[in-house]
Amino acid sequence: MIIVYGSKRCPDCVVAEKAFAEKNITYEYRDITENLSYLKEFLAIRDKSPVFDEIRSLKGIGIPCIIEDGGEPELDAEKFLGAKIESGAACSLDKKGC
């Protein structure tokens, strides 16, 4: 099963959702801004995974976060989907991503 942690308020996540739909990939979307339980789950993953080291150092969030079958988090939707996706307007303070 694929789980995607993200937010409907994040342009990067919206673009990733569209790409998943275009590829007909089934996944569970967990919106961290709509559900505090999902936020807590995501933070537990984010705080212990070295995948997020750079994101944390840049004061980023690290979404969309894609986890397949309980594996390591993937932060690059393009890499996960194996295809280039149209970039959204980033929501970070430096406009480089979430």
Image (cartoon, rainbow, N blue to C red):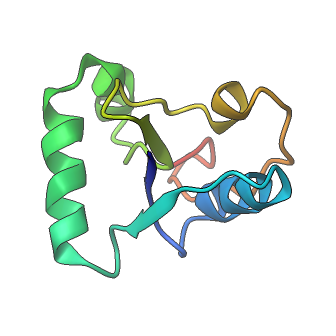
Q: Quadrant of the N terminus?
A: top left
User: Does 45 appear above or below 72?
Assistant: below
Along the line of sight, which residue is nearer the eye, 56 or 45?
A: 45
Q: Is residue 31 left or right of residue 20?
A: left
Along the line of sight, which residue is nearer the eye, 12 or 26?
A: 26
Q: Is residue 77 left or right of residue 29?
A: right
Q: In percent of the image, x 67 and y 60: which residue is there?
A: 17
Q: Is residue 15 left or right of residue 50?
A: right
Q: Residue furthest bottom?
A: 34
Q: In percent of the image, x 30 and y 33: which residue is there?
A: 70
Residue 98: percent from left, percent from top? 50, 49
User: Does 48 appear above or below 50?
Assistant: below
Q: In percent of the image, x 46 and y 61: which residue is there?
A: 28
Q: Is residue 77 left or right of residue 3?
A: right
Residue 2: percent from left, percent from top? 47, 46
Please identify the quarter of the rendering in which residue 55 is found. top left
Residue 58: percent from left, percent from top? 38, 32
Residue 27: percent from left, percent from top? 54, 56
